[in-house]
Image (cartoon, rainbow, N blue to C red):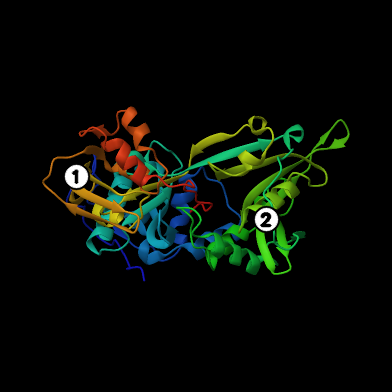
Amino acid sequence: MHSPSPFSSKSRSPEPLSSKPPSPDYDFRAPDDWSDFTEVVGLAYGGYDHSPEHRATVAELLEPKRSLLACAAGRPCATLAGYSLDMTLPGTGPRPVFGIGYVAVSPAHRRRGLMRDMILRVLSDLHTTRAEPVAVLNATEPALYGRFGFGAASQAVSLTIPVEARALAEGPADDGPPLTLEVTSPAEAEAAIARVCRACLAERPGMLRREGAWLRQALADPPADRHGAGRLLCMLATDGAGVRGYALYRLTAGWTHSYPRYTVSVQELSACDPAAYAFLWRALLDVDLGGTVTADARPVDDPVLALLADPRSAAPTVRDQLYARAVDVDRALSGRGYATEAEVVLEVTDPLCPWNEGRWRLITGTTGADCVRTRANADLALTARELGAILLGGGSLVQLARAGRVAELRPGAVQAAAAAFRHDPAPYCPVVF
């Protein structure tokens, strides 16, 4: 079970948090419920009113005892939502990680160090209670969280496949029963989708266990949030034994020279085997009335890029996705698997979490790893941000070293460590929290 983390305090954190530290007048406590977040989040994200269904969904996901609220004169002015997540790490099954979301500060309280203070309080509590060793978040502004030790740990690719580029190369052979297509509502397919999610959970680092409210979030379809598109639909790839994959998608009406050219927007696609995966993509690219097929966030090494006869015309655009940071270096690095055997001494700089600073000897193997403090000479020098970028096996140590963000202090150390840390397939998280 995850340890509760109230993060409650009426005093400033003992460490200076920025050039303008928060005033002692700020109180920090756990929220009672989502209503404590509503005003701050609304102001911070532009004053848009979300639908009642959306508010109910985020309220159901919120864990008040693991979240943090800052108040000034009794009124909420900054928020941080904390989530108890189970995430697949490289070479392991799902492991507890701490999710961070809805980090927001009211406009009148910006530039006072509140965000830094909240994140430090959360990380300090996780360290003190020996709770989750890794924290993860989705960054609205990518440049923001590097200063807090979060590195871009996964990437996603957006695709726009025009009508003329929808041809697929011959797909994988399928020796199983013939696949058939079923189109239904997500609600009716919920049980089948849950089974596919469980079956695919260990496929990639970054994948989250989705049950209960987390699965309902993925299937939610408030009419007010469709923005002119049709309702959410679900394709199922089935055979005589059951469902082998699903796709969530919607259509947006469009016409070109009196011909229907609807946009097919793929929200999610997951399958238990390559044949079912290719089957679903072929079905999506052949939807009646369909024109352009879009997919906003797919794995950076999505197999569809190898299936498309003309992948260039899909205009793949790569962007950052999940950000990660080590709460405790030793627990984070010894809690994941590695591709090769290696021994490397890391010199870590982490001013926000000084308990992580110093030299760490990491000994990796294909069946486990050990990470302990050492006085030995360092092989690599890096900050918490770079360490976060390689935690899930997606960031490249070689790339970081060539960019000057990792220093190689022993010849050959970068290549050896890079081979151990990297994971294939690449990490990917389909959930925004």
The residue most toward the right is 258
Q: Assign the N terminus to one quadrant of the image.
A: bottom left
Query: Residue 203: x percent and y percent?
Result: 51, 56
Q: Which amino acid type is shown beneath numbered disc 1?
A: Pro
* First-in-chain label (2 vs 1): 1
Which of the labelled discs sits on residue 16, or is there none?
A: 1
Q: Is residue 111 visible?
A: no
Residue 270 in which image quadrant: bottom right
Answer with left or right where residue 236 lies relative to residue 79.
right
Left or right of 207, for residue 391: left
The residue carrying pointer 2 sits among few (fewer than 14), some (14 to 19) or many (20 or more) residues within 10 Å by Cα, namely many
252 is higher (above) or lower (below) than 274: above
Instruction: Identify the image quadrant of residue 419.
Output: top left
Circle 2 sits on which residue? 276
Relative image position of residue 81 (x, y in whole percent): 41, 57
Which residue is pictured at 25% across the width and 58% down the height? 127
Hey, what amino acid is under mark 2?
A: Ala
Name the residue furthest bottom.
1
Q: Which residue is depicted at the point 71% across and 43% down?
A: 170
Which residue: 35% across, 34% down? 398
Q: Is residue 313 visible?
A: yes
Task: Name the one closer to the observer, 8 or 320.
Answer: 320
